[in-house]
Image (spheres, rainbow, N blue to C red):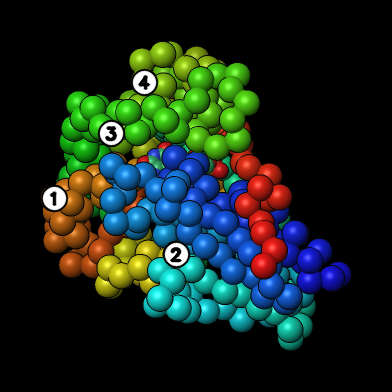
Amino acid sequence: MTDEEIVRYVVSRAVWAPSVHNTQPWRFTIDGPRLRVYADPGRRLAVADPDGREMMISCGAALFTIRLALRSLGYIPETQVLPDPGQPTLVAQVSWRDRAAACELERRLSGHVLIRRTHRGAFDLEPLPANALAALHDAATRQGTTLRVVADDGQRATLAAAVQTAEHQSRRDGDRLRELARWTPAPGSVRDDGVPATSYPARAERTLPYFPARDFARGHGWGTPPISPATSHRVAGVAALLTTTADRPADWVRAGQALQRIALTASACGAAVALHSQPLELPWLREFLRTQLSDGAYPHLILRVGLVTQVSLSVRRDFGDVLFSV
Ligand SMILES: Cc1cc2nc3c(=O)[nH]c(=O)nc-3n(C[C@H](O)[C@H](O)[C@H](O)COP(=O)(O)O)c2cc1C
C-alpha cells in the first residue's frame, strides 16, 4: 500500500471512534509516512467542556483507533502525543516504518471498530462473561489509566445520585439545553454528526440504582422503540470510573485512548458500554467524585458495562471531509 492508501484506510476507521455528543472534534493531515491528529476547537462544547477535556478524550479515542488500524496492517506505529507545546491542538503525530504481524488480541479489537456502539439505557440480566472484567481492567492499565469498578451498593447509589443530580441541573440550564439542541438532530436528518435518534431508546428504562441518560430527545418523543415490551428484568450493569493520576491535556488524551480500548474490549466480549459524563462536566460534582470515589485520582468518565440485545445506529462524517494533505 502507498502511504496515502494507508492513511485513507486508518482515518476511515478512526472516524468511528466515540466522541462527546458525536461532535467528531478532529481533523487529520497526511505528510508522507506521517499522520497528524488535530483537535478541532470549532467543534468543542463551549458550555459543557470549556477546557476542552472531553474534546481531547474524543481525539484520544481516534488516536487509539489509528494505532490499532496500523497494527492491523502489520505496521508498528511510532506515536508522539502533544509533540509541540506551541501547537496545543496538535494531539499526536504517528509514523510507521517497521513491521510486525498483528497479534490475536489486536486483530480481535480491530474487528470491532466499525460495529462497537455506545449503549444507552438498561442491560440484560445475564452477567458479563468470565474474564471480561479482567480484560477491561487490563485495557485501561495498558493505556496508563485506571478503571475503578464501583461494586459496593452504597457507592453505586452515590455514583448514580451524582448522575441524577447533574442531569437534573443540566435540564434546567438554558445554555446547556441550547448546546445539546445543536447536537441532537431530529429523526430523518441528513446530518452526519450529532446524536441521531436511532442511537437512543424512546423510553428510559429505570434501573436500580438509576443512571439517567442525557435527554437527547428533549421532550420530542424521539428514539427507537424497545425490541420487546418485557423490560422488567433489566439492570444497570457493572458501574465504573475511568481515572488518571493527573489532569493535564496528555492525561485527557490517555483517557481517550483507554476509553476506546475498553469499549472495543467490551464489544469483543459480546458486551457494550454506556457512558455518563454529565457529573464530570460540573466542577463541584467532579471534585466530589474525585475525593469520594476515586481515591483522589481524576475521573474522566462514568461507564456502565453489560450485555444488550438492542444495538444502536450512529453516523459519521466521511473520512474525506476530515483528512487533508500538507
Ligand atoms: C468524552 C465523551 C463523553 C461522552 N458522554 C456521553 C454521555 O454522557 N452520555 C451518552 O449517552 N454518551 C456519551 N458519550 C458517547 C457519545 O455520545 C458517542 O460516542 C457518540 O454519540 C457516537 O456514537 P457511538 O459511540 O455509538 O459510535 C460520550 C463520549 C465521549 C468520548
- Which residue carries the number 2 mark? 89
- Which residue carries the number 3 mark? 176
Horizontally, residue 125 falls left or right of residue 190, namely left
Q: Which amino acid type is shown beneath numbered disc 4?
A: Arg
Q: Which amino acid type is shown beneath numbered disc 3?
A: Arg
Q: Position of residue 109 (x, y in %)?
A: 64, 60
| Element assignment for label 4 | loop
- Which residue carries the number 4 mark? 218
Against 202, residue 175 (above or below) is below
Rendered image: mark on residue 284: 1
Task: Name the foreground residue: 182 vs 275.
Answer: 182
Circles 2 and 4, Cβ within 8 Å, touching? The answer is no
Sequence order check, earlier mark of 3 and 2: 2
Q: Position of residue 271 (x, y in %)?
A: 54, 46
Mark 2 closeness class: few <14, some 14–19, many ≥20 residues within 10 Å:
some
Q: Position of residue 99 (x, y in %)?
A: 76, 83
- Give me the C-alpha separation between circle 2 and circle 4: 32 Å
Q: Position of residue 260 (x, y in %)?
A: 52, 58
- Give me the C-alpha separation between circle 2 and circle 1: 27 Å
Which residue is located at x 22 percent, y 62 percent? 294
| Element assignment for label 2 | loop
Residue 166 image-quadrant placement: top left
Regarding ligand 1, which quadrant of the image does it lie in? top left
